[in-house]
Amino acid sequence: MNMLEHEKQIFEYEKTLQQLKEQNKQNTIWSDDEISKLEQKLEELRRKTYNKLSSLERIAICRHPERPKALDYIKNVFDVFEEIHGDRLYREDHAIITGFAKIGEQKFVVVAQEKGSDTESRLYRNFGMPYPEGYRKAMRVMRLAEKFQLPVVTLIDTPGAFPGLEAEERGQGWAIAQNLIDMARLKTPIIALLIGEGCSGGALGIGVSDEILMLEHAYYSVISPEGCASILWKESSAKDLAAQALKLHPEDLLELHIIDEMIKEPLGGAHYDPKEVYSKVREILVRRVKPLLDKQEDQLIEERYQKYRKIGKFIERSPSE
């Protein structure tokens, strides 16, 4: 498993403990009780380390190469998935996966951003950075969900929409803006789940929803800490300060009434026990969608509008103050 900077001491302790156990097989030096105490100390070290993580350390967990990606959730959370391809305008965008899915008897339409899990798949998926045709494909499939009265689940995990010239030439900003308008008016329930990075308009382009759920070490922000530091402080070394200022973790966003629920991850991150995370996500999606399905279309759209209307606060002051 790839080791993060804050995990060095844990990995060294684990390596030493494993060596002691191997030596004990050849020549018993340590008693079972002593080994058990060392294992307890290792567990205490894990808890101490993961309970005092900085913002940047949590972002490192969010970006861990072994962290479950959208395809992993699709394969392990849903019982059935049938993919839908193409935006019917230009081409297939592999950074966004769409299709029909089922959990038990409950049907869904899934729209997911996929980063890839190795070099080949990351290149194929454009590192999870969608082109305009990806957002148009997402909207085409969400309109199908509306037509067949199916709830939509979006899995968000992107460092941002692709910023290249060809994307701008094909209307990247327009495609995202159109999605914001159309998702706000969609006459079917929408649940957004942040499984990793939720950066800028690239995330918001499939993020307008009735419920916003978020894994513990995911983050949701207008910009990455590195980008924020380079703009506001003119140096990337200020990224830790930027990460704290952006309030991008689920605890902050719950307090600000931006998201609706945080899903706890195993100690150290979702990659340490993916099955536990898949089980939680499956249960929460089924639980969260039921009340939404009971609502009338007008009520659903009005509550969605009010949800976003209430986000953000400002203070008015007279010129003399």
Image (tube, rainbow, N blue to C red):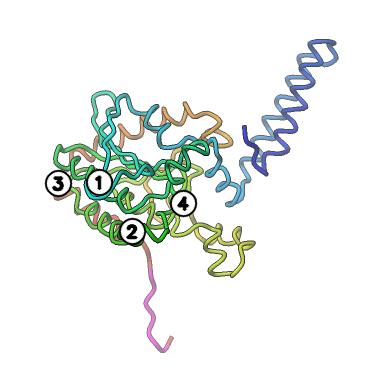
Residue type at the position of mark 4: Pro
Q: Specify the quadrant that holds the N terminus.
A: top right
Q: Report the predominant secondary structure element of the magenta stretch.
A: loop
* Lower sequence index among marks 2 and 1: 1
Q: Left or right of 47: which side holds 301?
A: left
Residue type at the position of mark 1: Asp
Residue type at the position of mark 3: Glu
- The alpha-carbon separation of the residues under discs 4 and 2 comes to 15 Å
Q: Specify the quadrant that holds the C terminus.
A: bottom left
Residue 44 spot, x, y in % from top left: 68, 33
- What residue sits right under mark 1 in the picture? 87
- The alpha-carbon separation of the residues under discs 2 and 1 comes to 14 Å
* Lower sequence index among marks 3 and 2: 2
Q: Is residue 84 magenta?
A: no
Residue at 74% of width from left, 27% of height from top?
15
- The alpha-carbon separation of the residues under discs 1 and 3 comes to 26 Å
Q: Secondary structure at mark 4?
A: loop
- What residue sits right under mark 4 in the picture? 159
Residue type at the position of mark 2: Gln
Q: Where residue 297 is drawn, which disc sits there?
A: 3
Q: Secondary structure at mark 2?
A: helix
Residue 86 spot, x, y in % from top left: 26, 42
Residue 246 spot, x, y in % from top left: 50, 60
Residue at 43% of width from left, 31% of height from top?
72
Viewer-nearest of labels 1 and 3? 1
Stretch in magenta: 314-320
Question: Is the residue marked by circle 3 packed among few (<14), some (14-19), or many (20+) residues within 10 Å?
Answer: some
Viewer-nearest of labels 4 and 2? 2
- The alpha-carbon separation of the residues under discs 1 and 4 comes to 22 Å
* Lower sequence index among marks 1 and 4: 1
